[in-house]
Image (cartoon, rainbow, N blue to C red):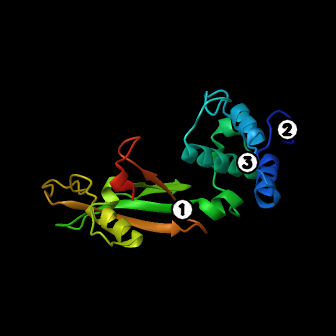
Amino acid sequence: LEVAAQGSLPMILPPLETLFANYKYGDDLVLPADDVRQVLSTLYARAGRFQMGEIDDATEVLEAILTIIHCEYCGIQLEDHGDDKVCTPRCPACAVFKASFFDQTICNKCRATSDPTPNDEFLYRVYVSEALQGPRNEGLQTALKRILDSETSGKCPSDGPGQCKGTTRVSRCCLELPEILAMNLVWASERPDQKVSQ
């Protein structure tokens, strides 16, 4: 395994390049991902994640790989909260997959707003049960807007003496769109009803 210039930890890009080359040019029915698994196992050994022989969630693996690419690009160790560092210019992982947005609570009665809450995510999570509550032929964009519009966040954000008792809604503003919006569809159970999954 190839290691970073600092010399101690393996790098993720070389095994990923081999994996994608095998996908593009190889004839194997199953991609040989052992090198990628070995790098993930080494880099996440302290956290006890992605250990050889264990099965991990595919979305967790994708997020971990993208985080490692970001850390390698920024020249920061994963353990040093490298995923919190903003990269300028944007690294390949952030440019292609990271969506930057902020949420703000707005009172429907007095129009008071909360401080914005920033979010940076490689995978946008959507709960399948919420997405399926709309009309049968509803498109994805319409379903996402409906889900966001139905979110409430509790009490009015105004903190004046005669605090408003109005209802609230969440406003989401996108700061930077990724080239690819990757979504994590979250099911209510490990074995969803077959009618629902169709």
Q: Is residue 40 visible?
A: yes
Crowding around mark 2 (Cα neighbors within 10 Å: few <14, some 14 to 19, many 20+) is few
Q: Give the residue type at disc 2.
A: Leu
Where is residue 80 shown, x and y percent of the image? 66, 37
Residue in view at x 73 percent, y 51 percent: 74
Q: Verify CB contact (< 8 Å) between mark 3 and mark 1.
A: no
| Residue, disc 3 | 31
Separation of marks 3 and 1 at Cα, in angstroms: 29 Å
Residue in view at x 75 percent, y 52 percent: 73
Crowding around mark 1 (Cα neighbors within 10 Å: few <14, some 14 to 19, many 20+) is many
| 19 relative to 161 in the view: left or right | right
| Residue, disc 2 | 1
Q: Secondary structure at mark 1?
A: strand
Badge 2 or badge 3: first in the primary sequence: 2
Query: In the rendering, which numbered label is found on residue 115?
Result: none
Q: Is residue 157 above or below residue 37?
A: below
Q: Which dot, 3 or 1, sits closer to the camera?
A: 3
In this rendered view, identify the residue nearer to me: 95 or 127: 127
In this rendered view, identify the residue nearer to me: 72 or 45: 45
Where is residue 99 shown, x and y percent of the image? 54, 62
| Residue, disc 1 | 99
Q: Is residue 97 above or below residue 59?
A: below
